[in-house]
Amino acid sequence: MEYLSKQRYDEIVTELNHLIHVVYPEVREHVAETSAQGDRSENAGYREARRRQAKTISRIRFLQKVLEHSRVIDPDALPKDRVCLLSQVEFTNLLTDTRMKFEIVSPHEMDLEAGKISLKSPIGAALMGKKVGEITEAQTPSGILRLRIDKISYDRCTDKES
């Protein structure tokens, strides 16, 4: 079971509908057109159209599975005193004295450039369930990080901060 924000759920539904109702019919039509051009064994356009069709079908099936095994997070049901999904967490790497801020999200929403880390990443997993002031360790490929939780905010959940 995966949990998604309402925004990400809506994005996936929009992409899926676009693939099913716009992209796939275009691809299917292109396959038919290139198939009618003669010998398929030497028809590069046909082979490329079939590859694009397979890729589109694969993406549709993947998105359907994501939605089938996902639930939308109810922000009001999340704990407000500890790091949880959709929490924005400010923490300090005690080894380098570097402050960082990330939002904890599901793996399907991860976007490092936007400051979103997965709850399943080493840092995300280490932060989950912790309270302000707690120190935790994260086992990363570059070694063990000692992290102190400085602030937890719930901008997407409520206006309340800890």
Image (tube, rainbow, N blue to C red):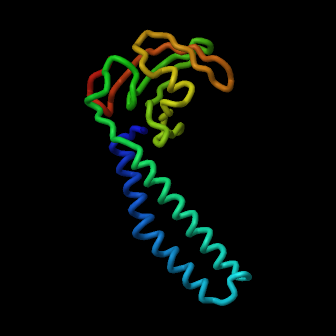
Report the side of 62 relative to 138 (left or right): left
Where is residue 95? Give x, y as percent. Answer: 62, 12
Q: Residue at x 54, y 60 (%)?
A: 58
**Foreground of the two, 111 or 42:** 42
Q: Which residue is drawn at 40% across and 49% down?
A: 67
Task: Tell me where residue 80 sits by quadrant.
Answer: top left
Report the side of 101 relative to 80 (left or right): right
Q: Which residue is drawn at 64% across and 17% down?
A: 144
Where is residue 123? Give x, y as percent. Answer: 54, 24
In the image, residue 22 above or below residue 100:
below
In the image, residue 13 above or below residue 18:
above
Report the side of 52 relative to 110 (left or right): right
For the image, the number of numbered tags is 0
Extreme residue toward the right, this view: 42
Where is residue 129? Give x, y as percent. Answer: 42, 19
Where is residue 105? Give x, y as percent. Answer: 44, 34
**Foreground of the two, 65 or 129:** 65
Q: Which residue is drawn at 50% across and 33% down?
A: 117
Q: Quadrant of the N terminus?
A: top left
